[in-house]
Amino acid sequence: MTRPISPTTARLTGIALVVLPLVALALKLASAGWMVVAIIWTAPVWLIGYGMQVAVAASGYLGGRAALREGTGARRALIAAWATSIAVVLVGIFLVDGGDSGDWGSTFMLAAGLAGDGDAADVSSGIFVIAASVWIAGWLWLVVEWVVALVRRRRAARVPAPA
């Protein structure tokens, strides 16, 4: 068995899982365009995924019997949680968006004064693709680790104590 994750690290990880997707959305809204419309149209999918992530944060890191604080998968889950949390913020910064106006680009491009620059859009899109891949893979990995931890905890609770 591995050493448990500290309560402070667990708390920070749980808070990051809840707050950083909202930060990413706020960053994305700084360069809102048609992609934001697509996000609104697909809102149920995003809300279900975010709800799952909040459930992971609550029962995996923030609860009194935090399932992801100890056990063989605790370190893996910690890596997955931070990978998905950081990557979603990068997605919010680098997702290229545009609309009917002349200012199109990612939040990064707008902040750097590169709105409408094709080369900057290519770089931003490349970073976005990598970040989105890490975000989704990290999220799936985290959910699997969470489910495994819950199953292990449930099995351990059913095992009778030795006589």
Image (cartoon, rainbow, N blue to C red):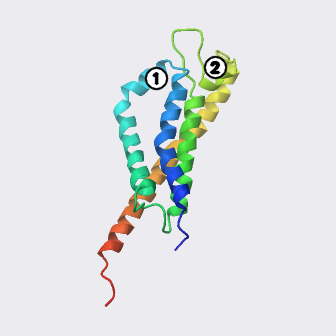
| Residue at the (55%, 70%) spot, across then down | 3
Query: The disc labelled 2 sits on which kind of residue?
Result: Leu
Q: Using the rendered image of the protein, determine whether residue 59 is visible from the camera's viewpoint.
A: yes
Disc on res. 36: 1
| Residue at the (37%, 30%) spot, across then down | 43
Disc on res. 163: none
> In this view of the protein, which residue sits in the foreground, 89 or 98?
89
Above or below residue 41? Residue 46 is below
Above or below residue 73? Residue 41 is above
Of labels 2 and 1, earlier in sequence is 1
How far apart marks 2 and 1 lie (CA) works out to 16 Å
Q: Is residue 123 left or right of residue 145?
A: right
Q: Position of residue 22 (x, y in %)?
A: 48, 34
Disc 2, SS: helix
Disc 1, SS: helix
* Residue that mark 2 sits on: 110
Query: The disc labelled 1 sits on which kind of residue?
Result: Val
| Residue at the (52%, 45%) spot, across then down | 16
Residue lying furthest bottom: 163
| Residue at the (49%, 43%) spot, across then down | 136
Q: Position of residue 109 (x, y in %)?
A: 65, 22
Assess whether mark 1 and mark 2 are in contact (beta carbons under 8 angstroms). no
In which quarter of the view is residue 60 placed?
A: bottom left
In which quarter of the view is residue 158 placed?
A: bottom left
Q: Position of residue 59 (x, y in %)?
A: 39, 55
Q: Residues within 10 Å of mark 2 (few under 14, many from 20)?
A: some
Q: Residues within 10 Å of mark 1 (few under 14, many from 20)?
A: some
What count of labels does the image hold?
A: 2
Q: Is residue 155 left or right of residue 103?
A: left
